[in-house]
Each structure stands twice: as structure tokens, then as C-alpha cells.
């Protein structure tokens, strides 16, 4: 499952992420699901309210160069996938 929690401090994160402006620039295309049970794999995310509920903790960085993973949110679940190899592949979900 990809139950995601956004931490306030960089050092608490499993990975540092940056939202890119264009789909082609992303390592990972992710889709935010509405129900927790729909979250699966690395690309279908459900954002949780409490840290203890999370499978993976992220920190949004302000600069692309500081990111471990560059992401882009997609509009349809079927579009969610890895586009480029990354050290976090198969580790998020």
C-alpha cells in the first residue's frame, strides 16, 4: 500500500520529493486515490492524517535538485507509473 504522510521536517522523511511542472520531467507519475483500500504499489497514493498510519513518509522540497524523486500528479489512475529508474522504485508502496 502507498499510504503517504507528509512530514514537517526533512530529516523525518523516507524520501524528499519535488513536484515538477511537466509530466515528462517526472520520475514517478502518481495518482491520489479517494479510499485507503485503493492505495497500492508505488504510484497509487492515499494521504493519511497521522504519521503512525503511513507506509511511507515524504517531505516536499522547494528545489528540484534537492529531491530524491521528482513526481507529477496525474488525472487518471491508469496513467500512474514509474517513468524512469529510481532508487525508491518498489519502496514507496
Image: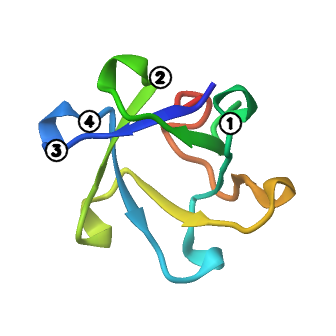
- Which residue is tagged 1? 35
Distance CA(mark 2)–CA(mark 1): 15 Å
Quarter of the rendering occupied by the C terminus: top right
Q: Mark 4: which secondary structure?
A: loop
Marks 4 and 3 close (CB-CB < 8 Å): yes
- Which residue is tagged 3? 10
Distance CA(mark 4)–CA(mark 3): 6 Å
Q: Where is residue 84 in the image (x, y as percent from the top left)?
A: 64, 56
Q: Which mark is residue 13?
A: 4
Say which label, 4 or 2, has the lower sequence index: 4
Residue 62 is drawn in which quadrant? bottom left
Residue 5 is drawn in which quadrant? top left
Q: Mark 1: which secondary structure?
A: loop
Distance CA(mark 3)–CA(mark 1): 27 Å
Of circles 3 and 1, the one toward us is 1
How would you rate the neighbour count of disc 3 (Cα within 10 Å): few for under 14, some for 14-19, many for 20 or more? Answer: some
Q: Eyeballing the image, is 86 above or below 36?
A: below
Q: Position of residue 19 (x, y in %)?
A: 44, 68
- Which residue is tagged 2? 55
Residue that appears at 28% across and 68% down? 65
Q: Is residue 51 left or right of residue 45?
A: left
Q: Mark 2: which secondary structure?
A: loop
Amino acid at each position: 500500500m502507498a499510504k503517504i504522510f507528509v512530514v514537517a521536517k526533512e530529516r523525518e522523511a523516507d524520501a524528499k520529493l519535488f513536484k515538477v511542472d511537466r509530466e515528462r520531467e517526472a520520475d514517478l507519475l502518481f495518482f491520489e486515490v479517494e479510499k485507503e483500500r485503493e492505495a497500492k504499489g508505488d504510484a497509487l497514493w492515499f494521504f493519511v492524517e497521522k504519521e503512525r498510519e503511513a507506509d511511507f513518509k515524504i517531505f516536499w522540497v522547494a528545489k528540484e535538485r534537492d529531491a530524491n524523486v521528482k513526481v507529477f500528479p496525474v488525472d487518471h489512475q491508469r496513467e500512474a507509473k514509474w517513468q524512469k529508474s529510481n532508487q525508491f522504485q518498489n519502496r514507496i508502496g
